[in-house]
Image: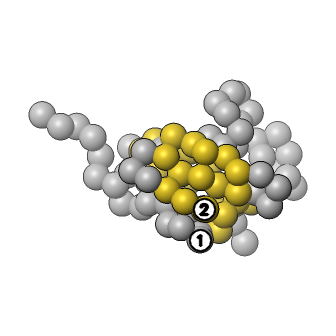
């Protein structure tokens, strides 16, 4: 039996994404999707590229950890952009 959630939102090339820091509300991480495959997405923050393994949340939305996976690492979800 396959228990993997159906993917409802995927990273799209050219998409702009943003998320806030867990430590400081005024700190915003912004990324642009440069490329993607079925398992990896490459994000650019304006200075450098981050190649990340794609994970799928229980609600079916793809997400990645562009700065690595540690306690205060930002999580970027597909389709998420704060105004």
Return the x and y of residue 22 as percentages of the image width and height. 76, 42
Return the x and y of residue 16 as percentages of the image width and height. 65, 68
Please name the residue that numbered disc 1 is placed on. 14
The residue tagged with tag 1: helix, strand or loop?
loop
Residue at the far left in the pictured view: 1
Q: Decide: marks 1, 2 in contact (CB < 8 A)?
A: yes
Return the x and y of residue 33 as percentages of the image width and height. 60, 62
Residues at marks 1 and 2, CA–CA distance in whole angstroms: 5 Å
Name the residue at 67% across, 46% down.
Answer: 50
Q: Residues within 10 Å of mark 1 (few under 14, many from 20)?
A: few
- Image quadrant holding the N terminus, namely top left
Return the x and y of residue 67 as percentages of the image width and height. 71, 39
Name the residue at 61% across, 62% down.
Answer: 34
The residue tagged with tag 2: helix, strand or loop?
strand
Closer to the chain start, of discs 1 and 2, is 1
Viewed as shown, does residue 34 lie left or right of 10? right
Q: Is residue 16 above or below residue 63?
A: below
- Image quadrant holding the C terminus, namely bottom right
Viewed as shown, does residue 83 lie left or right of 14? right
Please name the residue that numbered disc 2 is placed on. 33
Q: Visible in this render: residue 75?
A: no
């Amino acid at each position: 039996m396959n228990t993997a959630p159906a993917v409802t939102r995927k990273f799209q090339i050219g998409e702009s994404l943003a998320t806030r820091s867990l430590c400081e509300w005024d700190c915003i991480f912004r990324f642009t999707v440069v490329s993607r495959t079925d398992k990896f997405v490459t994000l650019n923050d304006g200075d450098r590229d981050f190649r990340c393994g794609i994970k799928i949340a229980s609600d079916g939305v793809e997400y990645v950890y562009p700065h690595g996976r540690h306690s205060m690492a930002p999580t970027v979800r597909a389709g998420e952009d704060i105004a």
